[in-house]
Amino acid sequence: MNEVYVYNIREWSDIMNPFEKIELKKDTFTKKEMIVYNILQKNPDLILRGSITSLAKDYQVSQSTITRFCQKIGYDGFNEFKFDVFRSEKQGRQEQNNNLSTIDSYCRLLNILNENIDNEMMERFAKSIIHADTIIVTGSHKSSLPAKMLQYNLFKIHKKVIFLATDEFHDIDQIANKNDLVVVFTNRGNGLSTFNNIKEKKKKTNSNLLLSLCMINFLSRK
């Protein structure tokens, strides 16, 4: 039954701003990461005018904790997070100038979802999740956020879910059994290389891993 789903989530970062991503992951933060969360919630301007070094020094939190916080919400590190905050603030000002309301933004998002989600495919995907012994999810950089959110939400229904970094996938044929489900999230289509690597390894090792590809342009704009 083992299938590999590859999700193309282009422009996810254009739809969710950095603070929405933070709220989405809030329940998964450690105590130390919650310190960073509280600092940024009370003083969001620190993100733009400060550095990881100054934040760590002024608020007595380690740079590694700040980095892990940023990685947990889908960024490589603080600098990428800072740039996305700047981009989001700039975009927000432009939208205000264009009189684009919050309701308009959510209506646009709902329209994008309606146009791009294949209900039959999603039903098949849901059934695969239900019947899988173990679900293995992966995604790198920004793509790790939806992958980890899928893992977190499946924990709530008591499903066994493993998150693997993409550089750990070289042993996937040794990890996954025939009744497992593999889900690959990709931001720019580079998850296809992961899928193809698994496929090639299957040929060389005569693995029992069964593969099928289900591409979804999940949140792209027309």
Image: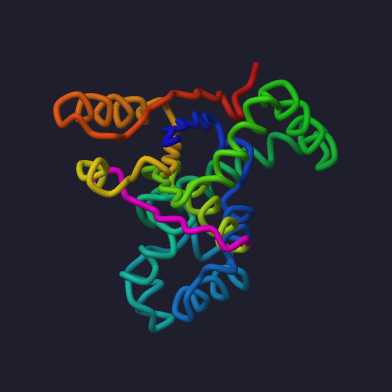
Q: Residue furthest bottom?
A: 60
Whether 211 is among the magenta residues is no
Residue 222 appears at what percent x and percent y?
65, 15
Residue name at image x 49 percent, y 55 percent: 73
The percent coordinates of residue 191 (x first, y second) are 37, 31
Image quadrant assignment for residue 138: top left
Q: Where is the N terminus found, in terms of image quarters? A: top left
Where is residue 149 shown, x and y percent of the image?
Answer: 54, 53
Rendered residue at 43%/47% (across/down): 144
Q: Residue at x 46, y 56 (%)?
A: 161
Is 8 placed left or right of 79 in the picture? right
Task: State which region is magenta.
Answer: 157-167
User: For this rendering, which residue is in front, 158 or 138?
Assistant: 158
* In the rendered image, the vertical position of residue 173 relative to residue 63, given as above or below: above
Which residue is drawn at the image coordinates 44% and 59% (left, top)? 72
| 44 sits to left or right of 200 | right
* Residue 189 found in image quarter: top left
In this rendered view, identify the residue nearer to me: 68 or 8.
Answer: 8
Q: Quadrant of residue 180?
A: top left
